Amino acid sequence: MFKDERDRSRKLTRAQQIARAIAVVAVLVIPVSAIAQDEFGLGATGVQPGRSYMSELPFEQIDLYSGKRTLSFTDVVFPGHAGMDLRWQRTYGLDAQVSSVPTWSGWSFGLAGVPMQIFDDCFTSSCLSGPEPPRPTFLAVDGMEKGYYPVGATTYAQVVTSRFWKYNRVTGVLEFPNGWVGHYSPMYNPATGDVWDVGSLLTGLEDTFGNAIQLGYILPDGGPPRVATISQFLPGQTRTLWLQYNNAFLTGVTFQGRTWTYVYAQTGLTEVNPPAGPGWRFEYQNNTVWRVTTPSGGQVTYGFDLKDPPNTQGTPVNVLVTRTTGGRGIVPGTWSFAYDWSDTSTFVTTVTGPTTTAVHAFYAQSAPVTGHAKDLTVSAGGTTLRSEHFTWVEGPQFATPPAGGGAASVRSALLSAHTVTQDGQTFTTEQSYSANDYADDGQPNHIVQSGGIPRTIDRSYRHTFDVYRIGALASETVTVGGQSSTSSYDYDG
């Protein structure tokens, strides 16, 4: 926040205190695979559906279930048509790094929202027709996704993900439910003819609105391939982002003579400098980013501690325990985080901030809702200001489990009810879903809101297009006090 916002914060009303306390917490509600990376879902990488996150500043995501902190920054954006922008992003805190853009010490670079690499040992007919092969892994700058086999599939050539991506292992084509199409290819060592052990790399991306993105690669000193150029093609216009390396690390990206520079020290990436003006600074302690300094001079300092969560075979994990803000343009304050994993059915995280305490309860060891929000209580001075409760239902099966996966099916978790109690009033939102089209891509078709002014919302969705696209809103009817209003939507293609 800036100074005028800091002055106003001293005069917050009770309602404003509540709003400020919960504004930084978001619950991401989309379908999620029932098979997590571990029994309790603590090892999941990237932003996870259904969890509560603290994001007081736009570049941070604090997973209040696992205690992981992720930092994400967008350095360059090329606007595209109909939302297909080229976004060059860097992320810190993931368990895996994009190796086609090599960097140092926990950072990944790449295009936002799109896998840069697909690790798959099976792309030949003999592999696809034999015993169940290993499933592919989709690695993006903002997390990882696992592939599963669709229900009723008779071949291992096609896989799907919990985000409803569809990947053809033979053609290397990845289809997104918004109509985007990505192309991936293994890279060969010209000296030996062998495939580089970097998976299939993103070579192009397009949609039906005239957007296209192409990636060019180099083989420096005979080493593994690296991204050299990223070009955006629009009707009548082309933009190209050029990547520069020094030895094994990305040192800059350039567009039309303007360069964003990445500076490293022994600890890792320490500076990001734009073409003009001040940049970002990063300091490290115990091999992790300890302090972030913004271009305006604000600072966020993070404290970590080793904890022993369940199912880690005695291997401690680093979790966030303190967060302190200050400096220019940021309201000063300190937050502490305490984790209670003693009850293996419900994990509890308590966040104590400058003015309020928030207690978050999560479902644990109960697929498909493992890690999903269960309850939230916000209090100040021993007085409860706000409480919330989340109810989830098991969604449709969208894939079959891997061999030996220990689950009967791969299903989604869908939010069925959300209750909020504040200032003596209770507000409830109940949601119902279709049994078809994977519950309309995990979107409710009937919503009932009560507690204030009762309202009912009915929606229908379109799933058939010239390209792969699902869950587009077709109609919406809102009913209040016996009066209804209907809106309809049409789409090209």
Image: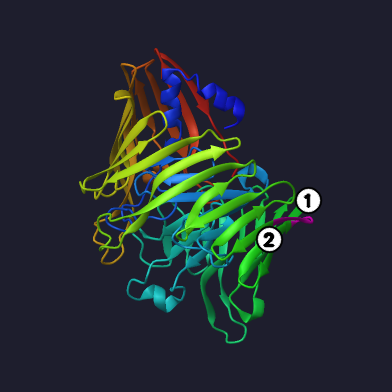
* Residue that carries the numbered disc 1 in the rendered image: 236
Q: Position of residue 426 (x, y in %)?
A: 31, 20
- Say which of 298 and 409 sits in front: 298
- Outermost residue toward the bottom in this view: 192
Identify the residue shown where x is 50% and y is 63%.
Answer: 97
Is residue 361 depicted above or below 453 in this figure?
below
Q: N-terminal of the two: label 2 or label 1?
A: 1
Identify the residue shown where x is 45% and y is 35%.
Answer: 24
- Position of 145 with respect to 295 (left or right) is left
Residue 445: image quadrant is: top left
Q: Is residue 258 magenta?
A: yes
Q: Amino acid at mark 2?
A: Gly
Q: Position of residue 414 (x, y in %)?
A: 34, 40
Q: Quadrant of the N terminus?
A: top right
What colouring method underlies this structural image?
rainbow
* Residue that carries the numbered disc 2 in the rendered image: 252
Q: Amino acid at mark 1?
A: Gly
- Say which of 326 and 350 sits in front: 326
Q: Position of residue 432 (x, y in %)?
A: 33, 33
Is residue 174 depicted above or below 207 in this figure?
below
The region drawn magenta spans 255-260
- Neighbourhood count class around disc 1 (C-alpha, 10 Å): few under 14, some 14–19, many 20 upward: few
Identify the residue shown where x is 35% and y is 52%.
Answer: 33
